[in-house]
Image (cartoon, rainbow, N blue to C red):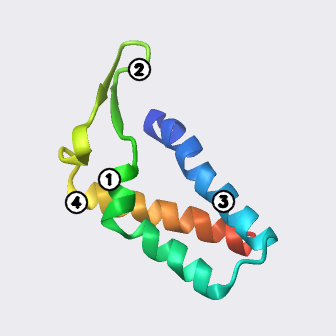
Amino acid sequence: MNNSIKLLTPFFEQFYREGVKNRMDNISSQEFEQRISYFNSDNFIQEIDMSETFISPKVHIEKIDNNSQISDKKIKALIKGVINSYEAGYYGK
């Protein structure tokens, strides 16, 4: 398995678990839509703690300030993954 995928799995898993919890809590469709909107918001993007790993976590991890060094394409892919993970948990996929 690609090392970057291994590193991102726990990140996406937290959103999957949140979706499962929200389904079990029977949140309203309005609350569901609000969560999806939040995941698409600039506030959410700024709150993500991002770091970039070179070679391995034991060798070097660099903090990325304000996500400014991450391309828009990568941010959009990350957000899509978050939303897909949350929805998969919520819908039981």
Q: Which residue is mark 3?
A: 18
Choose the circle earlier in sequence order: 4 or 2: 2
The amino acid at mark 4 is Asp
* Secondary element type, mark 1: helix
Q: Which mark is residue 36?
A: none
* Secondary element type, mark 3: helix
Residue at 24% in and 45% down:
66
Marks 4/2 in contact by CB < 8 Å: the verdict is no
**Quarter of the figure with the C terminus:** bottom right
> Percent x, y for residue 29?
64, 86
Q: Which mark is residue 72?
A: 4
Q: CA distance from mark 3 to mark 1?
A: 19 Å
**Quarter of the figure with the N terminus:** top right
Q: Nearer the viewer, residue 46 or 71?
A: 46
Q: Residues within 10 Å of mark 1 (few under 14, many from 20)?
A: few
Residue at 74% in and 63% down:
21
Choose the circle earlier in sequence order: 4 or 1: 1
Residue at 69% in and 71% down:
90
Which of labels 3 and 4 is toward the front?
3
Q: CA distance from mark 3 to mark 4?
A: 25 Å
The amino acid at mark 2 is Ser
Q: Residues within 10 Å of mark 3 (few under 14, many from 20)?
A: some
> Percent x, y for residue 88?
65, 68
Q: Quick check: 29 above or below 16?
A: below
Residue at 81% in and 69% down:
24
Choose the circle earlier in sequence order: 3 or 2: 3
Q: CA distance from mark 3 to mark 2?
A: 28 Å
Choose the circle earlier in sequence order: 3 or 1: 3
Residue lying furthest right: 24
